[in-house]
Image (cartoon, rainbow, N blue to C red):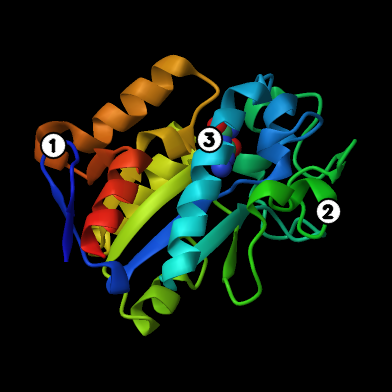
Amino acid sequence: MTVIAADPYPFELHPERCALLVIDMQRDFLESGGFGEALGNDVSQLRRTIEPNRALLAAWRARGFHIIHTREGHRPDLSDLPEAKRVRGRSATRIGDPGPMGRILVRGEPGHDIIPELYPLPGEPVIDKPGKGAFFATDLHALLQGRGVTQLIVTGVTTEVCVNTTVREANDRGYDCLVPEDCVGSYFPEFQTMGLRMIAAQGGIFGWVSHSNRIHAALAEAR
Ligand code: TIU
């Protein structure tokens, strides 16, 4: 066990039962021409998260700890896309429509895949999820239980949507969650701030907030 400085109080890391869960670092959210831009967002806001995620993945890989990636997206026939999600935003370009990186948020299309900088290694599970939360309609919980995981370090995009939803789902299922602020990103600076404050407020109502520097420091001390 090693301790990571965090808000609202230190996080006791048990590395052998802590998975790094990287949420939706997909081209559709981080590159132009995808879903994020179709919703009217400036995708460059998210790109500062790439380097800290790369470094954290490298640290986790070097030590052989659990790593899991997720991708938000749908079957090519869109049979798992509820109308209530498809029509959101009243956007001219919607999920399933063609775009510069293929059909938007559709599995198997270039835009749906994880950005090359953070591409999963063979053996690292990739969870394809139809919703915002990574536990909804996926086998993530079973997979984590099978590996004896009780703690999650949750990174990725976006802070107030898929990261926040996943942290809430995870805490309800019994996982302790730590969110490193530099490894999560929002298209909206104010939602980045508030999305993190919502997690750590009220004594850490859903989890802990920290910084990847503090995680690297704790790992270095543990050696
Ligand atoms: N739009 C937005 O902020 N996010 C999403 O639609 N999905 C994720 O957060 N991955």
Depth-wise, is mark 3 or mark 2 nearer the camera?
Answer: 3
Amino acid type of the residue that numbered disc 2 sits on in the rendered structure: Glu
- Seen at 86% across and 41% down, the residue is 101
Residue 88 visible to the viewer: yes
Depth-wise, is mark 1 or mark 3 nearer the camera?
Answer: 3
Mark 3 and mark 2 in contact? Answer it, CB < 8 Å.
no
Q: Quadrant of residue 88?
A: top right
- Seen at 74% across and 33% down, the residue is 31
SS type, badge 3:
helix
Looking at this rendering, what residue extends furthest in the bottom direction?
146
Q: Please count the marks in the image.
A: 3
Residue at label 2? Answer: 109
Question: Is residue 50 toward the left or the right of residue 152 in the image?
Answer: right
Q: How would you rate the neighbour count of disc 3 (Cα within 10 Å): few for under 14, some for 14-19, many for 20 or more?
A: many
- Seen at 33% across and 44% down, the residue is 179
Depth-wise, is mark 1 or mark 2 nearer the camera?
Answer: 1
Residue at label 3? Answer: 49
Q: CA distance from mark 1 to mark 3?
A: 22 Å
Question: Is residue 16 toward the left or the right of residue 46 in the image?
Answer: left
Q: How would you rate the neighbour count of disc 1 (Cα within 10 Å): few for under 14, some for 14-19, many for 20 or more?
A: some
Q: Is residue 5 above or below residue 109?
A: above
Seen from the viewer's position, the closer of residues 107 and 211 is 211
Q: Is residue 40 above or below residue 112?
A: above
Percent across and percent down for residue 172 are 25, 58
Residue 132 visible to the viewer: no
Seen from the viewer's position, the closer of residues 92 and 175 is 175
Residue at label 1? Answer: 8
Label located before the other in sequence (1 or 2):
1
Q: Quadrant of the C terminus?
A: bottom left
Amino acid type of the residue that numbered disc 1 sits on in the rendered structure: Pro
